[in-house]
Amino acid sequence: MKKATIIFSIFVIQALAVNSMNPVIRELWSQDIGSQVTQINIGQYYILALSDCAYVFNSVLGTTVMEDCNYNSTVTYNYGRFALVAPDGTIEVYDDYLSLLYSFVIPQNFTSSVLILPDDKILACYRGCALFDAYGNVLWENDQLGLVLNRPSFNGELLFVPVNDKQLVEVLTPSGTLLYSISVPEAPWSIDACGRLMAVKGSSTVFLYNVTSSGYELWWTNPSPGPYGDVKFSKDCNYLIAAGSYKLLIYNVNGTKVLEMELPFSISSIDWRDDLLVIGGFDGSIRAYKLDVESLSSMSSAVTADTNQIPSLGLVSLALIKALRRKSKE
């Protein structure tokens, strides 16, 4: 058997293992809130979901802790903070224990999506974006960005803002300086940044970029599972989940699909924190899963991210290679 055939066989075996076994993902609990789940946010102890109302669930048991139908514009979680935004622009920020920390009012033209940044700063967007401090003071404002329907992302150094009407992802510094624009062939429905990687989910394609303050490079493209939905990185930046329609796909950062899962409902939103994956549906269902990342890693094509979080090819199983070589000699 030739080397190329051996490598091909390795990928076939791994693909069969992923699709025939599924110990990697296990359902923990489910809820039904009756209408489309537009956003899911996993906190330290609680899960925040948005539909016609904002809901807070116990992340372990799935029990409802809070329901508030006044704050139904957008919600978010980051840096140990939950934020709920009402249609009139009132924003309330809570800590991990659901204690109210502060509240203020933002202009209604920034109530479509919010992102919590370090030092209790809040980026709020809709027709452009503005950055606020914990007292509601405007630190900077840019109303020329375009229509921002979905949540921006932050990798600790750079802000990534999806501009739907221009099919762009704008890259800014936290101080509001526009560094450059990434032109995306499809409207950026969902984005997520992790280290030096930034993923974009369009209606038919998932794009992975390598990004720095000086520029970007398209790393790969892969089929999207369907329109709407979300894209999320794992905590270590080694994997990303793309969800849409009735399907969930997990890719490693080299672009190899390592898991595909069909669901009985159409996916509208997801979030992923450590081994907890929570999926919201257009039918109002919310399902929490335990995702065994170690098993996922063993099923992967042995691709890891280096210390700079730039994709690099790892080593496949030596035992598997030897077994295939023995088989080829028979």
Image: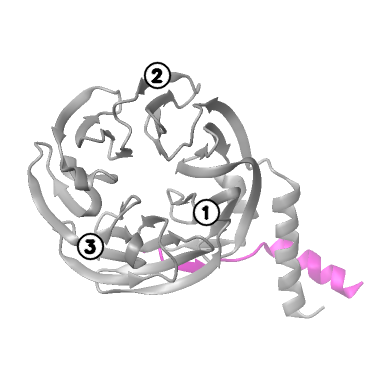
Please tell me which of labels 2 and 1 falls first in the chain.
2
Task: Say which element carries label 3.
Answer: strand
Residue toward you, 235 or 134: 134
Mark 1, residue position: 242
Q: Position of residue 295 (x, y in %)?
A: 62, 46
Kind of residue at badge 3: Leu
Image coords of residue 222 (percent x, y): 55, 66
- The numbered mark at residue 145 is 3
Ranked by sequence position, the earlier of labels 1 and 3 is 3
**Could you tell me if residue 255 is visible in this image?**
yes
Task: From the viewer's side, name the closer residue of 194 and 300.
Answer: 194
Q: Dividing the image into 4 quarters, which one contains the N terminus?
A: bottom right
Which mark's residue is nearer the viewer, 3 or 2?
A: 3
Q: Is residue 323 magenta?
A: yes
Q: Residue at x 30, y 23 (%)?
A: 97
Q: Is residue 322 above or below residue 242?
A: below
Q: Range of the magenta residues?
A: 308-330
Horizontal and vertical percent position of residue 260: 64, 52
* Residue matched to label 2: 65
Residue 49 sits inside the magenta stretch: no
In the image: residue 255, left or right of residue 155: right
Q: For marks 3 and 2, give the CA distance.
A: 37 Å
Q: Residues within 10 Å of mark 1 (few under 14, many from 20)?
A: many
Q: Residue at x 20, y 37 (%)?
A: 89
* Mark earlier in primary sequence (3, 2): 2
Q: Along the line of sight, which residue is nearer the eye, 128 or 171?
A: 128
Mark 3 and mark 2 in contact? Answer it, CB < 8 Å: no
Q: Is residue 109 left or right of residue 291?
A: left
Residue in view at x 85 percent, y 73 percent = 328
